[in-house]
Image: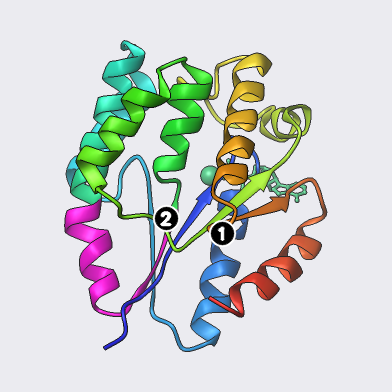
């Protein structure tokens, strides 16, 4: 059996990841792929408990980093790798690039430390494709305005998200063969069309 593909969605809060997940699943299913949708932090029962802590409990940025990777360790072992081995296409709303963007870019943890955690938890395991939904911070902030109770990350200011956006773009520049950067300021139907093109060849 051919292995599945691991597709990750990245971008700041309000970029449009959740908006496009159903369409991404449909596009892959239309090509006969079995699809598993999952998310980080989370994706397992323990991971979802860690997510609650991560989103609502104040903690040191390095504690935050380690809990993210603790949840990821479970996620890879219990969910992602077994599904890929069964030929399933796994679509995850965020993965390790988010640690480089949020914990390094946003919180100032060194890339060397996050790199060590990455090496420890996943070795050279990487997504096959990463869709970066990129949008100016003013736009994503506007989209989130008036939304439900903001979590610990969503409460941060524009500077925080600016640094995260830049860190994401730097990751995309560093790994161009894996990343596709989507201009998420465009109207939803145009993005859908672009996703259709990208996903027709994975
Ligand atoms: N391309 C777009 N144009 C206009 N509004 C959008 C677009 N993409 C998403 N939105 C809106 O922005 C808000 C945040 O989108 P969402 O998909 O939840 O972002 P994320 O999951 O990346 O945090 C939602 O209200 C959504 O309807
Ligand atoms: Mg979302």
Determine the residue positioned at 29% across, 71% down: 84
Percent x, y of residue 147? 62, 32
**From the viewer's perspective, is residue 20 above or below residue 115?**
below
Looking at the image, residue 41 sits to the left or right of residue 144; the answer is left
Determine the residue positioned at 74% across, 61% down: 191
Q: Residues within 10 Å of mark 2 (few under 14, many from 20)?
A: many
Q: Is residue 47 visible?
A: no
**From the viewer's perspective, is residue 36 above or below residue 105?**
below
Distance, label 2 to label 1, CA atoms, is 18 Å
Which type of secondary structure does the marked residue at label 2 adopt? strand
Magenta range: 76-92
Q: Which residue is more in the foreground, 100 or 135?
A: 100
Q: Quadrant of residue 167?
A: top right
Percent x, y of residue 5? 40, 71
Percent x, y of residue 10? 54, 46
Q: Quadrant of the N terminus?
A: bottom left
Percent x, y of residue 2? 31, 85
Q: Quadrant of residue 188?
A: bottom right
Mark 2 near mark 1, Cβ–Cβ under 8 Å? no
In the image, which disc is placed on residue 24? Answer: none
**From the viewer's perspective, is residue 184 above or below residue 151?**
below
- Which comes sooner in the sequence, label 2 or label 1? 2
């Amino acid at each position: 059996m051919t292995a599945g593909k691991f597709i990750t969605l990245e971008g700041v809060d309000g970029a449009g990841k959740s908006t496009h997940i159903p369409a991404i699943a449909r596009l892959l299913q239309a090509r006969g792929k079995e699809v598993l949708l999952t998310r980080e932090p989370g994706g397992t029962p323990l991971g979802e408990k860690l997510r609650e802590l991560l989103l609502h409990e104040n903690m040191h940025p390095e504690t935050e980093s380690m809990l993210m990777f603790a949840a990821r360790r479970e996620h890879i072992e219990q969910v992602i790798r077994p599904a890929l081995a069964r030929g399933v296409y796994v679509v995850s709303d965020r993965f390790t690039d988010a640690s480089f963007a949020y914990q390094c870019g946003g919180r100032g943890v060194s890339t060397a430390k996050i790199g060590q955690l990455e090496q420890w938890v996943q070795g050279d395991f990487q997504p096959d494709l990463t869709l970066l939904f990129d949008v100016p911070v003013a736009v994503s902030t506007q989209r989130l305005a008036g939304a439900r109770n903001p979590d610990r990350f969503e409460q941060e200011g524009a500077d925080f998200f600016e640094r995260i956006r830049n860190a994401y773009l730097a990751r995309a520049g560093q790994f161009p063969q894996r990343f596709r950067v989507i201009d998420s300021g465009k109207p939803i139907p145009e993005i859908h069309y672009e996703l259709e093109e990208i996903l027709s060849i994975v």
